[in-house]
């Protein structure tokens, strides 16, 4: 088989195979994702969105801590401006 092929497909065919059970009852045998035991169709790349609400956070600008920090900074700035105007 490999001898009739123009390219070297040895490493390709020797790669680990997916062992997921198909609807026929046989193993899937598609190439598994590197370092994983399953192929791209059977959960090798992960299993959907991250748990919880982690995807909703893009930069944290509107988190409670960040808003509180900005408010505190505004108050400090206002206080120092008042101080400067008085002197
Ligand atoms: Zn598979």
Image (tube, rainbow, N blue to C red):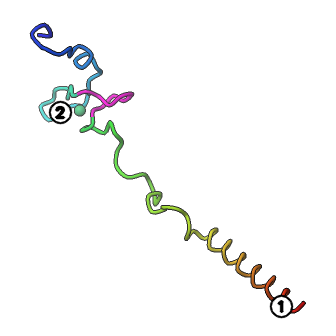
Q: Nearer the viewer, residue 11 or 48?
A: 11
Residue 69 in the image: x percent, y percent?
Answer: 68, 71
Assess disc 2: are there few (<14), some (14-19) or many (≥20) residues with their C-alpha within 10 Å of its C-alpha: few
Disc tally is: 2
Q: In which quarter of the image is the C terminus?
A: bottom right
Point out the tag, 2 or 1, that comes first from the N-terminus: 2
Q: Quadrant of residue 25?
A: top left
Q: Mark 1 points at which residue?
A: 85
Q: Which of 44 and 25 is in front in this view?
A: 44
Q: In which quarter of the image is residue 35?
A: top left
Q: How far apart are marks 2 and 1 (CA)?
A: 77 Å
Q: In which quarter of the image is residue 79?
A: bottom right
Residue 54 in the image: x percent, y percent?
Answer: 47, 57
Residue 36 drawn in magenta: yes
Q: Mark 2 points at which residue?
A: 22
Q: Quadrant of the N terminus?
A: top left
């Amino acid at each position: 088989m490999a001898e009739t092929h123009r390219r070297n497909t040895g490493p390709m065919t020797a790669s680990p195979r997916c062992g997921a059970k198909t609807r026929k009852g046989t193993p899937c045998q598609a190439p598994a994702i590197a370092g994983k035991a399953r192929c791209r169709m059977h959960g090798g790349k992960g299993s959907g969105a991250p748990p919880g609400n982690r995807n909703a956070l893009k930069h944290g600008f509107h988190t409670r801590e960040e808003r509180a920090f900005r408010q505190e900074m505004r108050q400090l700035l206002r206080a120092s401006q008042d101080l400067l105007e008085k002197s």
